[in-house]
Amino acid sequence: MQKVFYTRKLNQSSEIEFEKWAEDYFGIKLPEDFIDFINSNGVGREPIPCRFDGKIDMEELIIEAFLRLSPSDNLASIQASTDRAIGEDWISDDFVMFAEGAAGHLSFVLAVKGPHRGKVFAFVDSGVYLEEDRIRLENGALHLADTFTEFIDGLHADEDDVDDWEDSMDYLPDEIKEKFGSGS
């Protein structure tokens, strides 16, 4: 699975606490590749790579943040976001929300139970226009990948992402240079 870098890495509670929450909440363990990603990459804002090739004529979906593992009362946590989405009937209790885009209106979820376990989907909380008003998704979900690893490995960055990241951080990791270009 490829590495993801963040301009702002978020502090989080322990993975053990998170796994316990997931087991209590869903009654099962989360997919191993998801836990491996959290353990090796952490979470944060403005990730690079951050783009996923879109579906239904959209050029790409952009992740603005991977949600943090923190107390469930923290609104920016995986736990609170998942609980809110289930409570609002945006998703069923087979999913955990792990990332967001489009100023919080585009959510990335992982199926943790049922026949779709391990698959990654994107959904919108209400109608939202993407790609310069060409596509409107209304409370719909898009299947993005069959596994979390496939989803992460499908992320990419464009030249502007690389330049913005380098400007923000005053350096560019070698892995980013090698995979996506050298920046400015």
Image (cartoon, rainbow, N blue to C red):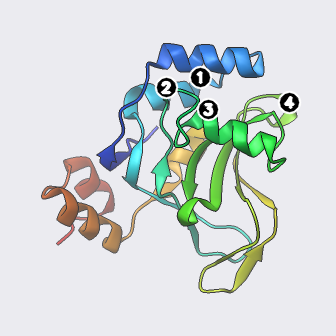
The residue pinned by badge 1 equals 32
Residue shown at the point (65%, 25%) measured from the top left: 31
Labels 3 and 4: the sequence-earlier one: 3
- Looking at the image, residue 47 sits to the left or right of residue 115; the answer is left
The residue pinned by badge 2 equals 36
Image position, residue 39 (x, y; %): 43, 25
Secondary structure at badge 3 equals helix
Mark closer to the observer (3, 4): 3
Question: In the image, what residue type sits under mark 1?
Answer: Glu
Circles 1 and 3, Cβ within 8 Å, touching? The answer is no
Residue shown at the point (78%, 40%) measured from the top left: 86
Q: Disc 4 to disc 2, how far (Cα)? A: 21 Å
- How many C-alpha atoms fall within 10 Å of the one at disc 1: few (<14), some, or many (≥20)? few
Question: In the image, what residue type sits under mark 3?
Answer: Gln
Image position, residue 67 (x, y; %): 51, 42
Note whether residue 44 is visible: yes
Labels 1 and 3: the sequence-earlier one: 1
Secondary structure at badge 2 equals helix
Q: Disc 1 to disc 3, how far (Cα)? A: 18 Å
Labels 2 and 3: the sequence-earlier one: 2
